[in-house]
Amino acid sequence: MVGSAQMKAPTVVLCPIDFSEPSRSALRYGAAVAEHFGAALSLLTVNDPLLEQAADMASGEGSLRAAATTELERFFQDTFSGRPPAARATFAVATGKPDAEILEASRQTGAGLIVMSSRGATGIRRLFLGSITERVLRATSVPVLVTPPADSGPASPEAIRKGIRRILVPVDLSDAMAEPVRVALALAETLSAQLLVVHVIEPVRTVVPGHAYAANVDSDRRGRAEQRIQQFVDALPSQTRIEPLVMFGDPAEEIAKIASDRQAALIVMALYASVSGVHMGSVTYRVLSVTHGLVLAVPPSIRD
């Protein structure tokens, strides 16, 4: 099963910065996490190669990189003008494709967590998951905390503890569910929060005209799911209050609804392994797109 709920604390928290207000919010979360764990805070901004080349020709080699470093430091100071975080901050400027440089920086710094925003909103019912964030999620080897763009961010680590009273972790009842539950449980213990372990059963849709499946199928599926999830929860080595929930409906919609109704401020979602690297399942992507809260995306094989 899950084993110990202890998890390795990050020694470096990486915050990509594009100087937008959503990235300022993500920076506040990153700083609060770094301060809580005694980790270093690494700020990174990425220059476009063509702009850097043009700046080099117009103002001298390295001019854009120097300006970006100054702006990054100013952005940090402005963000925490009232209360500088205790975490030690470093500033880096890279050149290239943002997602590739973010992932490379996470490797070079040994980051244990990346904190970035999902960016702006679109449509009536969902948030648009920024393309850079999406590409990072599809290739990351470390957890990524995705922050909502409308959230201004916490003022301190204590604000996170007060704001996250429930954590929701969706499970699919496969062997892969142990990993995100382990991470969510460790966070629940750290924050003294309640843990909601949620499984959503998708309705069976018959494709044969005139054929209806037996009326008791849904009841049987719910009974088996409730039994499996209760056994799983009972085996967790924790004193944390854990509530198992089994629901029917569209998984992403139900997960977002439960998080809203039960005021679960953090959702812990799994990313999955594939032959080409990390795979972000459709449910994970859609939850990231429809939720208005924090989402911690956990790649496979996060171990102590």
Image (cartoon, rainbow, N blue to C red):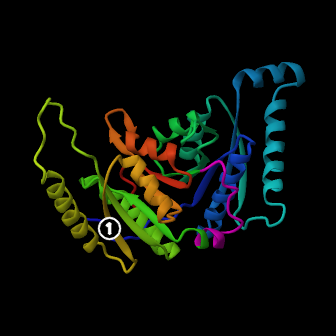
Residue 153 among those drawn in magenta? yes
Q: Tell me which residue sits at (31%, 76%) in the image.
A: 237
Q: Secondary structure at mark 1?
A: strand
In the image, is residue 20 above or below residue 223? above
- In which quadrant of the rendered view does residue 129 lie? top right
Q: Tell me which residue sits at (42%, 45%) in the image.
A: 284
Q: Position of residue 206 (x, y in %)?
A: 18, 36
Residue 55 among those drawn in magenta? no
- The count of marks equals 1
**Residue at which label 1 appears:** 244
Q: Nearer the viewer, residue 39 or 222?
A: 222
Q: Quadrant for the C terminus, please.
A: bottom left
Q: Quadrant for the N terminus, please.
A: bottom left
With 133 as the anchor, is 297 left or right in this view?
left
Q: Position of residue 143 (x, y in %)?
A: 48, 52
In the image, is residue 215 above or below residue 178? above
Q: Nearer the viewer, residue 11 or 166?
A: 166
Per the rendered image, the range of residues in magenta is 148-161
- In which quadrant of the rendered view does residue 120 lie? top right
Outermost bottom residue: 239
Q: Amino acid at mark 1?
A: Pro
Q: Position of residue 182 (x, y in %)?
A: 37, 64
Q: Nearer the viewer, residue 273 or 131?
A: 131
- In which quadrant of the rendered view does residue 151 lie? bottom right
Q: Tell me which residue sits at (72%, 66%) in the image.
A: 155
Mark 1 residue crowding within 10 angstroms, few (<14) / some (14–19) / many (20+): some
Magenta segment main secondary structure? loop
Q: Nearer the viewer, residue 66 or 207?
A: 207
Q: Position of residue 267 (x, y in %)?
A: 47, 57
Q: Tell me which residue sits at (47%, 43%) in the image.
A: 140
With 211 as the anchor, is 234 left or right in this view?
right
